[in-house]
Image (tube, coloured by chain):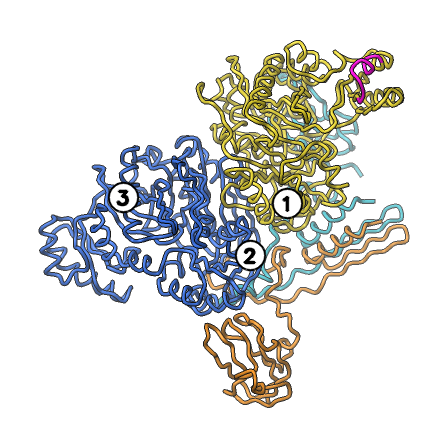
Chain colours: A orange, B blue, C cyan, D yellow
């Protein structure tokens, strides 16, 4: 029967070709690999569209590492709001080591309230909330470096 | 040696710098915009930091984001590549002020050479031949007219802080100069925030010849021969080669001496390029100095065997250049560079998009520097350079033949490229004979 | 039983041709590959699209060259039989320039009957029919070169 | 020059030969099996002919199909590459009989050098050093025992028509030789259809050093220096380099003279390789001559600048080699070749499959010869060579550092490759110091 690597290869193949299902039965062994329903894709190309562009939509390529997929479950839940870092720097939860954090999980925050500081080039940049709501998660530890766009807080907005 | 270097660039030059760092045992930090998460330099570097949105001003031109990325990753030095922040004296200064090393010349050298009329004055004071023209910025139109009358028409007005043709005007007689002056000043003011102009004698069919130089902290300055860059369209180079068909050994030596004198006059340390205009009569004059590594640097690497980016890093660290003192650098064979741009070869319209298929040429004498791969999407935000095809041959004839086959073996689907245009240039009799000047492409396309 | 590479090829083929289902049963082995209905793609022109997001959906795998798609309509019609060239060489319809062709369109042929000659290295190789039937098409002109596997004749088999 | 050449091969060498033909202005015909319709050589050639089923015996080894393909396309010459029909004297003869040119030596030279014991005899008669051993095929076991007693143990039995280790037996004393003889003869008979054996003194820690030679129809024979090929596993080379760390200029000259003598003794014309065993004491002896272009030929191209495949074609056409008569060929710098195979780096199991992603290294001193691309499926029918990574540096130290970064920048997904193994070898102290012999890999893997 198939070797493990071959089964893996099969799984990859099904994942990448958009095939719906593969079933192999041989000498008492049965292997079934089922693809995932294709999402309906809406693509808005910036420029003139041609048939090649339509074709592009069909297959996820093995070449496309899915780094753009948001890997944090909080961000996909509809009623959660993510505060990303607008700059590169070092994340601080308080204005100085002796102070309390600006906010902690469970705190109510209002638009414009300072959530944290991101230091870059010795400048302390205060990051403010852009919604009213409750802090449900702090994504970064105090003193850690953050990238542009990196999630800092998850806030559940007030309805 | 540095233990960690941040590369403040993207595309093929970021990949090229990573290669040099790897050979020197240096850890690398890539920075990238939101649009460049899948760029090869991000995959190849030891660390990467997203520094901003796709627009260059928010990411690759964002000084504080780049500095912050270096700080949070503990990089000791920053290599700016070319373009973006590479010739920004202010950035070089901040890097130094933050206790890091800028891999390039000093902010002072960048500033001196960045101001074209100041550069002219510095060169004149060091006996580097310059075109007849103003000693510094022109005070007003009247001064310009008097000077033009003295040196004779045609003359050309250029912006003191300029580049890329903006603020530039050609005048064949006094009437044209009168009308050109104000519009040039206005264009310069709006493009560079500096409306001052300088004036030079206009050379009619010049070649663009540049000399690669290396200068280290111990005061040693060498040149590594010339690159012929006359094949350009709207000041964008398309094909470069070394050596130039126009230079005999005597002229090469004279121009090389001038390049070294120019470098010394600017108290320049690191790799740099001195550009000359070479007139039909064999006279040459200093045009400007590029205070960075250039796109076409591999042409020189192909004929000298010197790794220019490694030399840049060594020199920035304070080491002497690695070229043996007694070694006379002579070009070995002949090299061409073809810039493969994502653009329509007829209309020159940019052609971003998904690279669907790609095979690169290999075989003897061929080097390809690139960041693209099958499955990569060329974003519309940045310049259109996809790859540099470098070709080396025992002589110009072999290099020309090899160039054709290398470009024919470069297979790409999904975007249009300049390759069909370059293959047509390889059929041009004047190009094949080396009869080129900076107006070649106008004639060719005309 | 098919080899693993063959199964993979099958999966790719189903994925790239839009075939709905392939099932192979042979000596206790069963292989089933199910394609999927082509996704509906809606493309609407609008600017400002996040390029990373497009990338995920895009990419026709450069990996799937559709050479396996049969490009000759005769061969797919169920009741037509294709006679390919078993060797490389030059195709001759008759044994010498003066003779009549071995067969022409409309002729009835029987298994083992000579259909043509393919010359290779001065050797005249007689190509025989492997079915009883009627010649419906001659694919190659007299004196033309043929590749291995190139279709020579289409024969409609006798029922 | 020929106007059209058929390439009777596939993979990277077919692509390499197409490059050479393009540079010589020759039209190319690719042949391919049913499984290779999407191979790069098919895309790059001017014409292509499908010659049979995926199994080599029906396609790439199918003499009449290859000849017929040449006939129907009007090719004037056939380049056999390496492997497949490259050292088949019968094929070379048929090509000649059909009025075409075989790009390689004469059938007679192939035959002489293909029969290993006859080659030994030819060399001995021309004062090329050979190992003590039999003058030709051994008549029987008794003769073998007598001879071994004379020259001293250890001795090695080899198949007259052999290669690749089959029919080969090592004997450390008389008892072993007695038992080895019959099994070696049987293995040789079944593998090569020729059960005759010859016997040689066994060298314990030899290096495999080979000399590249070029010989043209005008009687000129030159050598282009050596390649060190000791890093091999089961007679499969993994890494080659030039120059060898073991050769001083005196030894190089002596071995080069012997290689030229061997070539002349075989009345050999075209490119070829003379293989020597180099013992620890610096003595060397003729092992065999490869009558074809070799996989590792680019190593020599990197240090000499000579395009060996173009020379092959020129010589086959009847032109003299293009190397200037007075030019002394001296190696410039140092080069390595890494054979990137589709195989598990631990178990060496073949790893065919779809190449999902691919980026190749570029930058200074790196050349990649390959036929693969993202989207290509490596078929299971042929050898596992995916690509050759060639690296050049100013000296061995730079070439070693550059090798590491080139292999690190070679990114491939979908198949396993030998790169992780080669990166580990680049960490080995003995390898780094150049202390290698043909048992290196056994020790390394042991």
Residue C92 visible in the current orientation = no
What x and y, as percent, mark residue B392? 45, 36
> Is B162 on the left-hand or right-hand side of C31?
left
Q: Nearer the viewer, residue B259 or A59?
A: B259
Circle on res. B27: 2
Q: Quadrant of the C terminus of chain B?
A: top left
What x and y, as percent, mark residue D296? 61, 32
Q: Is residue C111 above or below residue B86?
A: above
Secondary structure type for disc 3? helix
Q: Chain of mark 2?
A: B
Instruction: State the separation of the CA atoms marked 2 and 3.
Output: 37 Å
Secondary structure type for disc 2? strand
Query: Of the residues under marks 2 and 3, which one precedes in the sequence?
Result: 2
Q: Are marks 2 and 3 in contact (CB under 8 Å)?
A: no
Query: In front of the other: label 1 or label 2?
Result: 2
What segment is highlighted magenta in the picture?
D146-154
Q: Is residue B282 above or below residue C32?
A: above
Is C6 in the magenta? Answer: no
Residue pictured at 21% horizontal, 48% vertical: B130
Q: Nearer the viewer, residue B193 or B137?
A: B137
| Disc 3: which residue | B258
What x and y, as percent, mark residue D407? 60, 46
Instruction: State the separation of the CA atoms marked 1 and 2.
Output: 33 Å
Q: Are marks 3 and 1 in contact (CB under 8 Å)?
A: no
Secondary structure type for disc 1? loop
Residue pictured at 38% horizontal, 40% vertical: B241
Q: Are marks 1 and 2 in contact (CB under 8 Å)?
A: no
Q: Nearer the viewer, residue B310 or C67?
A: B310
Q: Nearer the viewer, residue C109 or D58?
A: D58
Q: Mark 3 packing: few (<14 Cα in 10 Å), some, or many (20+)?
A: many
| Disc 1: which residue | D376
């Amino acid at each position: 029967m198939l070797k493990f690597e071959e089964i893996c290869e099969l799984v990859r193949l099904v994942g990448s070709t958009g095939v719906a299902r593969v079933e192999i039965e041989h000498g008492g062994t049965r292997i079934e690999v089922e693809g995932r329903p294709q999402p309906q894709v809406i693509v808005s190309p910036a420029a003139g569209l041609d048939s090649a562009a339509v074709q592009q939509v069909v297959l996820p390529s093995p070449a496309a590492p899915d780094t753009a997929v948001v890997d944090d479950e909080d961000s996909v839940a509809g009623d959660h709001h993510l505060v990303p870092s607008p700059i590169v720097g070092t994340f601080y939860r308080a204005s100085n080591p002796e102070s309390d954090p600006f906010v902690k999980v469970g705190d109510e925050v209002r638009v414009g309230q300072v959530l944290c500081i991101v230091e870059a080039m010795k400048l302390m940049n205060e990051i403010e909330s852009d919604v009213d709501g409750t802090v449900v998660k702090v994504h970064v530890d105090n003193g850690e470096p953050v990238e542009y766009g990196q999630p800092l807080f998850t806030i559940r907005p007030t309805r | 040696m540095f233990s960690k270097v941040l590369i403040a660039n993207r595309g093929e030059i970021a990949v090229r710098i990573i290669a040099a760092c790897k050979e020197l045992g240096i850890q690398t930090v890539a920075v990238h915009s939101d649009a460049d998460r899948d760029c090869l330099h991000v995959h190849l570097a030891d660390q990467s930091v997203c520094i901003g949105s796709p627009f260059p001003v928010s990411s690759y031109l964002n000084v504080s984001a780049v500095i912050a990325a270096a700080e949070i990753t503990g990089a000791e030095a920053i290599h700016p590549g070319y373009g973006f922040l590479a010739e920004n004296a202010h950035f070089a200064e901040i890097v130094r002020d933050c206790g890091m090393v800028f891999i390039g010349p000093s902010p002072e050298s960048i500033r001196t050479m960045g101001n074209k009329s100041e550069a002219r004055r510095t060169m004149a004071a060091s006996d580097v031949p310059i075109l007849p023209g103003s000693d510094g910025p022109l005070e007003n139109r009247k001064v310009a007219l008097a000077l033009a009358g003295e040196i004779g028409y045609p003359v050309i007005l250029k912006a003191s802080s300029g580049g890329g043709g903006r603020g530039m005007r050609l005048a064949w007689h006094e009437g044209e100069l009168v009308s050109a002056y104000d519009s040039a000043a206005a264009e310069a003011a709006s493009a560079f925030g500096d409306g001052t102009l300088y004036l030079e004698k206009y050379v009619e069919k010049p070649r663009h010849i540049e000399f690669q130089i290396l200068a280290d902290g111990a005061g040693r300055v060498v040149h590594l021969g010339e690159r012929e860059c006359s094949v350009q369209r709207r000041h964008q180079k398309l094909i470069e080669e070394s050596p130039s068909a126009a230079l005999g050994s005597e002229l090469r030596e004279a121009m090389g001496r001038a390049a070294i004198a120019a470098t010394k006059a600017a108290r320049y340390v690191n790799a740099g390029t001195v550009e000359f205009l070479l007139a039909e009569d064999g006279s040459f004059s200093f045009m400007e100095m590029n205070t960075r590594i250039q796109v076409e640097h591999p042409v020189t690497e192909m004929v000298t065997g010197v790794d220019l980016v490694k030399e840049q890093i060594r020199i920035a660290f304070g080491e002497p250049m690695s070229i043996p003192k007694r070694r006379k650098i002579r070009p070995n064979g002949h090299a061409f560079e073809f810039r493969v741009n994502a653009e329509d070869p007829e209309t020159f319209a940019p052609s971003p998009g998904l690279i669907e298929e790609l095979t690169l040429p290999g075989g003897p004498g061929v080097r390809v520097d690139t960041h693209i791969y099958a499955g990569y999407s060329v974003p519309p935000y940045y310049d259109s350079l996809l790859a540099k095809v470098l070709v080396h041959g025992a002589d110009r004839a072999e290099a020309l033949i090899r160039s054709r086959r290398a470009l024919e073996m470069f297979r790409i689907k999904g975007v249009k490229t300049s390759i069909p245009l370059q293959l047509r240039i390889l059929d041009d009799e004047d190009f094949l004979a080396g009869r080129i000047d900076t107006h070649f492409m106008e004639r060719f396309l005309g």
